[in-house]
């Protein structure tokens, strides 16, 4: 999809957006996780009117951009030094690094306490944190499947096995042989967002595509899925 590239200034920031004219009555603004802003405007609207509406929502747009920046594994260069914040289940925790042995990561009193075993090398801290995330992801995702599963068990489906993996472009997938793969990074999102992704993938047990039947099932199992999706602003490509 290629729209017209436009931009407006808001304070010191420039908001670049992709503009599409579509057959609809109201203007729609979507901020994608990769930072792309898509504006769908009713055919015939003037650029001036569109800009006015974009400016009106600009605080929200910037908030969304900042929000996705935290999740985006590609953008923020994490330094793995003390004082930096890292996410877990939708909350930010500050890094506190000490040289204690044995090496470990603990989440306590609102801090990520990293014992780096006499080595302050950010790569050591990074590795410790990453394996902590993998461990927690496995636990949290299994928990999420437990929470989401009853609605699907009732349909006589077989519970899939969980696999976790760092993925660049998607939060989850479901293979034909019954393995649900979830992106390790998802453990940084709030629990309801994890449940949304899990529910979406579980719906694929019954419908392998994104057909209307698929959405009917999703709607039935998780009526407010769109709101949660919006929170995570997923683009499952
Ligand atoms: Zn899907």
Image: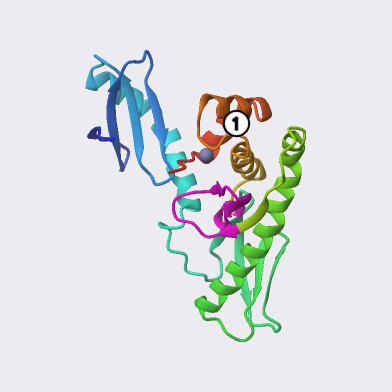
From what the image shows, is residue 230 above or below residue 71?
above
Q: Quadrant of the C terminus?
A: top left
In the rendering, at what x and y percent does residue 5 appear? Answer: 23, 36
- The answer, for residue 110, to whether it is visible in the render is no
Seen at 53% across and 64% down, the residue is 84
Circle 1 residue: 225
Quadrant in which residue 94 is drawn: bottom right
Given residues 110 and 21, the one toward you in this image is 21
Seen at 32% across and 38% down, the residue is 11
Q: Colour mode?
A: rainbow
From what the image shows, is residue 217 above or below residue 5?
above
Farthest residue to the bottom: give it. 118
- The answer, for residue 194, to whether it is visible in the render is yes
Mark 1: which secondary structure?
helix
Span of residues in magenta: 164-187
Seen at 25% across and 35% down, the residue is 2
Given residues 18 and 234, the one toward you in this image is 234
Left or right of 202 in this view: 109: right
Quadrant in which residue 200 is drawn: top right
Q: Report if residue 99 lies within the magenta region.
A: no
Circle 1 crowding by C-alpha within 10 Å: few under 14, some 14–19, many from 20 = many
Q: Quadrant of the N terminus?
A: top left
Q: Confirm or reject: label 1 Cβ below 8 Å from ligand 1.
A: no
Q: Report if residue 182 lies within the magenta region.
A: yes
Quadrant in which residue 37 is drawn: top left
In the rendering, at what x and y percent does residue 120 appear? Answer: 55, 81
Seen at 61% across and 51% down, the residue is 177
In the rendering, at what x and y percent does residue 63 appear? Answer: 46, 40
In the rendering, at what x and y percent does residue 19 appear? Answer: 27, 29
């Amino acid at each position: 999809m290629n729209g017209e590239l436009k931009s407006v200034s808001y304070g010191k920031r420039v908001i670049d957006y992709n503009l599409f004219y579509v057959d609809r009555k109201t203007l729609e603004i979507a901020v994608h996780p990769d930072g792309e802003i898509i504006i769908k405007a009713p055919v015939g609207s003037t650029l001036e009117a569109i800009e006015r509406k974009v400016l009106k929502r600009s605080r929200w747009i910037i908030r969304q951009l900042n929000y996705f920046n935290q999740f985006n594994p590609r953008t923020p260069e994490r330094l793995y030094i003390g004082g930096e914040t890292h996410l877990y289940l939708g909350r930010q925790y500050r890094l506190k690094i000490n040289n204690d042995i044995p090496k470990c990561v603990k989440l306590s009193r609102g801090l990520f306490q990293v014992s780096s075993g006499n080595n302050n090398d950010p790569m050591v801290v990074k590795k410790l944190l990453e394996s902590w995330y993998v461990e927690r992801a496995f636990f949290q995702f299994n928990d999420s499947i437990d929470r989401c599963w009853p609605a699907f068990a009732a349909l006589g489906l077989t519970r899939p096995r969980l696999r976790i993996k760092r993925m660049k472009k998607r939060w989850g997938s479901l293979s034909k042989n019954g393995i649900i793969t979830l992106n390790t990074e998802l453990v940084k999102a709030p629990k309801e967002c994890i449940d949304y992704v899990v529910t979406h993938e579980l719906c694929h047990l019954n419908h392998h595509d994104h057909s209307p039947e698929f959405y009917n099932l999703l709607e039935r199992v998780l009526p407010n899925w769109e709101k949660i999706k919006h929170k995570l602003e997923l683009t499952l490509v």
